[in-house]
Amino acid sequence: MEESRSVGADAVGRLIETGRFWHRVHDLGAIPADPSPGSVEEELDWRPVISPGRWTSPSVSELRCALASEPLFARAFGELNEEDVTRWLGSLCRGTDERTTGMNGEHRGLALVLRFKAAYPTGIHHLAIASLWCSLSGELRIGLLHHESVPVGSSRSKGGASRGRVYTTFDTASCYPGDLPLPVATSLQLVGLPDVNLKRVQYPHAIEAAALYLGHPQAAHAYGATEAWTSGHQGKLEGFEEAPNMTCFAVVDKALEAMRTNALDLRQKDLPRSFFALCRDDVISTRWARFSSLQAGPGQVVPFMTMPSLERKTQVTMFLRAAQSWGEDDPWDVPSSRGLTSAILHLSAGDRPSLPGSALAVRFTSIPRGAQLDGQCIDLARVYPRADVERMTYEGGEDGADEARLELR
């Protein structure tokens, strides 16, 4: 029988309290039979680890079954156009075949780097990571890990506090206040299935151990691109001052490195350094040269690496420029099932909106006052299917006509 690692909640809590959790590299390899007294290994109470079985490239049906174990993927497979789903799964299967061909004796599976486009209302793309490996019995296994910015309050209001959380599922509705749209669910509705890059790894199962560390409730931390991100703004989360600020880029960088080395580095790594590492290793289809310097304001272009030393307002500007446009330089191994375009919708009082014939769903980036659906104002964070848009009403502005800006699939 295969055994897996387990971490006791009390043990992790004690590590955090004693400052021995963050700011160090944790070995995810085999634990000695007699860990030294007071060591991290003794505190964590790991069970013995069984390595993955022999890797074999999966079929389309095996990939579909494994991915459908994640609720949001299962829903997307049922709701999206079946032709798009079939094409995407076929491309993923061909990609795994190609990566399998180049494996050496040390590779035991694949890491899947996932880009969920336009996941947030600001147009920011969301980065996540998953892995595939085979059990000793030959069954295809999947693990996933990603980082979200969860508002501490009822909305994503400008300047509002956000907590960084690491999850092993994309269905994070229970963690969001109110009825805020989930980032991954939004992207799946608006753009369809994600872009994917495939990387050969030696320890694909290490994603589970990394998730136990990073996803533990007591491993909460402030969301932030740098350590200065929270300074004088919302501050560190009370009780978690030792935890470094993180974004989805840092978490994916750490998880991918864990799957390559079987070690998890929890030391602080700001956005520019994580971004550089992911570009350098051709992980996110982004060329560092295009981001080495970013516009930080009118007529102000500064090196990306200097971001941590700048005032927060400038950091936010640089972050948005990078987060909204990464992943566009080189082809992805598996391209997303649909594209996303911007458009202007002309509105006249008394008329219902009319979308281009190919549009399936939209998210508004601006909408004039008076536009409604079933008596409710249009929500800029929500994705509307075509049928809902065609039921919207518009009372008209002062001149009886106006326009809305939107993203459409």
Image (cartoon, rainbow, N blue to C red):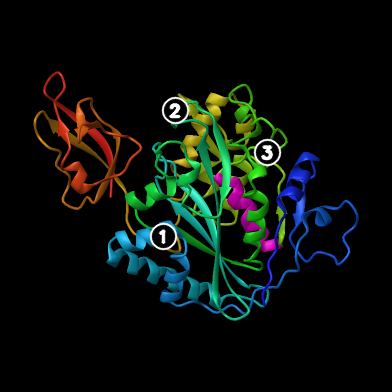
Residue 73 - label: 1
Residue at image coords 48%, 69%: 66
**Quadrant of the image containing the N terminus:** bottom right
Circle nearer the N terminus (2, 1): 1
Name the foreground residue: 230 vs 301: 230
Q: Residues within 10 Å of mark 1 (few under 14, many from 20)?
A: many
Name the foreground residue: 242 vs 175: 175
Q: x%, y% of residue 292? A: 56, 40
Residue at image coords 60%, 81%: 137
Q: Amino acid at mark 2?
A: Ser
Q: CA distance from mark 2 to mark 1?
A: 28 Å
Query: What residue range appears in magenta?
Result: 248-261
Residue at image coords 28%, 67%: 83
Q: CA distance from mark 2 to mark 3?
A: 23 Å
Picture quarter containing residue 263?
A: bottom right
Q: Residues within 10 Å of mark 2 (few under 14, many from 20)?
A: few
Residue at image coords 63%, 43%: 273
Q: Amino acid at mark 1?
A: Phe
Circle 1 SS class: helix
Magenta stretch, overall SS: helix
Residue 244 - label: 3
Picture quarter containing residue 82?
A: bottom left
Q: Amino acid at mark 3?
A: Pro
Whether residue 193 appears in magenta in the rendering, the answer is no
Q: CA distance from mark 1 to mark 3?
A: 31 Å
The answer to the question of whether label 1 and label 3 lie on touching residues, with beta carbons closer than 8 A, is no
Q: Which residue is mark 2?
A: 157
Q: Nearer the viewer, mark 1 or mark 3?
A: 1
Circle nearer the N terminus (1, 3): 1
Circle 2 SS class: loop
Name the foreground residue: 252 vs 385: 385
